[in-house]
Image (cartoon, coloured by chain):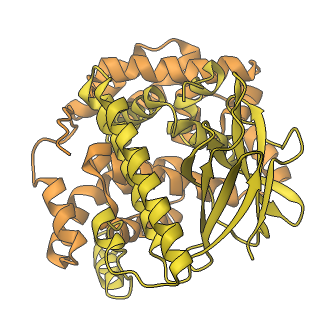
Amino acid sequence: MSTVVHLSAPQRRGPDLRELVAQVAFGDQVAFGHLYDAAAGPVFGLVRRVLRDPAQSEEVTQEVMLEVWRNAARYQPERGEVMSWVLTIAHRRAVDRVRSAQAAGEREQKAAARSHVPPFDEVAEQVEGRLEREQVRRCLKGLTELQRESVSMAYYRGFSYREVADMLGVPLGTVKTRMRDGLIRLRDCLGVAW
Amino acid sequence: MVTSSADLHTLTGAYAAHALDDPEREAFERHLLQCEACALEVAEFRDTLARLGAAETVAPPPALKARVLAKTATVRQLPPPSTPGEAVAGRRGGRRRTWTRLALAACVAAAAGLGGIAVQQYQRAEHAGVRAQQLQTQQARLTALLAAPDVRTATARSGGGSGTVVWSQHLGEAGFLADGLPPLASGTTYELWFDDAGTMRPGGLLTTSSGTVLLDGKIKDAAGIGVTVEPAGGSRHPSGRPVLLLPFS
């Protein structure tokens, strides 16, 4: 099946990640070392953003990279970029960790304690610097407040959309749609195209 | 197949951000198999969120790399999903089992053929790619199931047609072959269920009265499968008596 998929990828420099994954699928540890070099920073950064605890973030980063090693033969280029694949795994594992660590009651308390929405400056501060961060910052700024809060609380903090709705005091359906149209706007702003 | 309920469709964002709870995620994943537009949107949102994630890049402690690389020595890599061709070749088994397998294989091939036609109709090649990928994945898994050493089948009749369940305890997977089940009224679908000691667990939809489908989810401790008629899009719980009940025995 020949499928031509055009992607505007975040990383165009450096090694060809698809090629590396194909080599890793054959058990190539040297290639895995290179893949680690390219992916471990984004994985660790994202996981730490969600979990906050550096020690746990290291553990989860290790789990993620080993899942990449284990599943390299199952990576499907048609489904997206290598970095998207790896960061989807990373985000899912980080979120799983957040949710499993919190018993129901404890979770609600924490949710209440954390219910303030991060001031935008906080986000801005963390994404200053490189061009990519600059672009993400600019695009986040282009969302409505509710869109930005919905996307940020789910993605950066691991809250389910029900929790987001509770904490923001808006109906479930509103959060659902704001998350979706927020992501549509981000997608267009970042130039993600299939 | 056009059961893309607008309500489920709006969950693409929450799904891509891992913000659904388990039952909703499972329901949405079933929906995703039938909704090309949703699959495409999810893929785009994953890329979008990956950009947000990559913007958080922080170098991990250098010692972590050595630990991870050392661990690879003890972590077994999974093989690629088996391709249809290799799995069909060289099976052995009783005559009846072989026959059932061949009939099923033919159905799978037919389903894939239909998928091919459907795929042509999409104007954007990218849509077709996502859809074809889903079909391929489902087909590869069905083929692997048919080729499993411990595959077994059970058949029951309903109306003028029949239903056959194919399962492998080793793989923990089950497939269902419908052959001329009673025609579905407009706005309804067949839904498959795992029978967990009398509690029915959703196992996916079959939107035609003849066809083959791999059940969503693992067999686990289920005693068999059930088939009911549900409103288009499926239900969380069976809303009527089963059309078929097929025990794993």
One can see residue A115 in this view? no
Instruction: Say above or below: B155 vs B210.
Output: below
Most extreme residue toward the front is B160
Horizontal and vertical percent for residue A76? 30, 53
Q: Nearer the viewer, residue A80 or A30?
A: A80
Chain painted in orange in the figure: A
Instruction: Say above or below: A139 vs B84.
Output: above
The residue drawn where x is 42% and y is 64% is B143
**Shade of chain B as shown in the rendered figure:** yellow
Residue B120 occupies which quadrant of the picture?
top left
Horizontal and vertical percent for residue B133? 35, 45
The residue drawn where x is 82% and y is 52% is A104
Q: Nearer the viewer, residue B128 or B42?
A: B128
One can see residue B230 in this view? yes
Residue B56 occupies which quadrant of the picture?
top left
The residue drawn where x is 48% and y is 75% is B98
Most extreme residue toward the bottom is B74
Horizontal and vertical percent for residue B103? 48, 61
The residue drawn where x is 20% and y is 46% is A1
Quadrant holding the C terminus of chain A: top left
Horizontal and vertical percent for residue B192? 71, 49
